[in-house]
Amino acid sequence: MAEQSAELSPILKQATPVLAARGEGVYIYDEDDRRYLDFTAGIGVTSTGHCHPKVVEAAQRQVATLVHGQYTTVMHRPLLRLTERLGSVLPAGVDRLFYVNSGSEAVEASLRLARQATGRQNAIVFQGSFHGRTMAAASLTTSGVKIRAGIGPLMPGVAVSPFPYAYRYGMSEEQASEFALRELDYLLATVSSPKDTAAIFIEPVLGEGGYVPAPASFLTGLRERADRHGILLVMDEVQTGFGRTGRFWGHDHAGVRPDIVITAKGLASGFPLSAIAAPSELMEKAWPGSQGGTYGGNAVSCAAALATLDVIEEEGLVDNAAQMGERLHKGLAQVADAHSVVGDVRGLGLMIGNEFTAADGSPDTEAAARAHRAAADKGLLLLTCGPHGNVVRMIPPLIVTADQVDAAVEIWAESVAQATA
């Protein structure tokens, strides 16, 4: 057989030029040992920082004991301990869990549960939503056509309603909330009958759609409509959960209780693990055999998740996210005040977006890309998002310090100045 080498798919494009050799806390080091401030956190995954000693120790200990105990074949203690522990942070009454590996899988499991539990087929999502790349999850995703293009026909039964994107509509947050709720009512009257609607899926802060927080009044309005029509309210907390927004869950800012919570990303500090949580009476309506999977609830991932919860609690990372997020937002707002191309700075906690807008009000994708590249050159790793790629997002680990925030703001100010010179 002739020798051949393989390469990654050419469709996979890196957001930064870094070839990572190791990670430590808020920093990534390349193979030349150059240090970078990592304000991507693996898209919000390394919540406790890279290689937190407590998480590393827990994973190493578990690897030497049991790597894979397939949880519909045998049960293992890390999964039982994690389930019990999550009960202390989940919303009251949301007390049953099902584990899988990725956010997309958890979204699909939530949709399956909602349809089986209600006997209804439709789902409502909001413009700009990102719920995943697998077929059903992609059908729920409207953050950009790249997720949906070329794979149709997509799953039927999905209706899309406006998200209260105040900056895009030129409205105040409350005006945008009122507008989006009116449009949702119109959609229920014209597109998806409440009697056909199983669930409303919502991100408390749009992720890939541009880092746009949902006003509390909007989430409250969704809860009221869900109750009125017997529709399930599903909170996609894949990116916003586990302290990211300065509260443990993104929906905590609004004080609403979801029917289903989806969690992933920061759950296990970089190990693949996701879950859905629902009340007992709801989870019991799932049909026999509808929940399962080979790798779900992996023992090493569960051990890492337990250690992650310990670190979040012991180091006060939810409060730190709130305090450092406020400091970061203030610094970024000052940069925006000095550069009109940054039209909006928004977010919750350590989940902040900088939207680049041209003088005519159109998205300035090129300026965002230049600032993004300049920041990487200067040692600050960031990501872009939004349908036009004109939002530069900052999502550092929850352990970030004031000095690291200030260093990032300084680099960002230089990068924006360079990008607009």
Image (tube, rainbow, N blue to C red):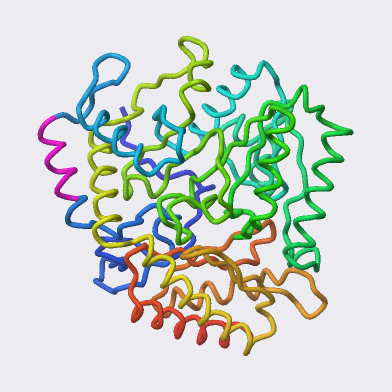
Q: Position of residue 114 (x, y in %)?
A: 60, 24
Q: Is residue 6 magenta?
A: no
Q: Position of residue 287 (x, y in %)?
A: 52, 12
Instruction: From the viewer's perspective, tell me whether residue 173 is left or right of residue 346.
Output: right
- Classify the position of the C terminus by image quarter: bottom right
* Residue under the point 49% across and 52% down: 240
When asked about the image quadrant of residue 352, the answer is bottom right
Can the viewer see residue 132?
A: no
Q: Is residue 59 magenta?
A: yes
392 shown above or below 176: below
Can the viewer see residue 14?
A: yes
Q: How many marks?
A: 0
When asked about the image quadrant of residue 397, the answer is bottom left
Q: Position of residue 420 (x, y in %)?
A: 63, 85
Q: Residues in magenta?
A: 56-65
> Which residue is more in the foreground, 313 or 62?
313
- Residue pushed farthest right? 190
> Which residue is more in the foreground, 17 or 308?
308
* Residue under the point 78% across and 70% down: 362
> Which residue is more in the foreground, 268 or 143?
268
User: What secondary structure characterizes most of the magenta part?
Assistant: helix
Q: Position of residue 409 (x, y in %)?
A: 46, 81
Instruction: From the viewer's perspective, tell me whether residue 326 is left or right of residue 298.
Output: right
88 shown above or below 345: above
223 shown above or below 120: below
197 shown above or below 221: above
* Residue under the point 49% across and 15% down: 290
- Classify the position of the N terminus by image quarter: top left
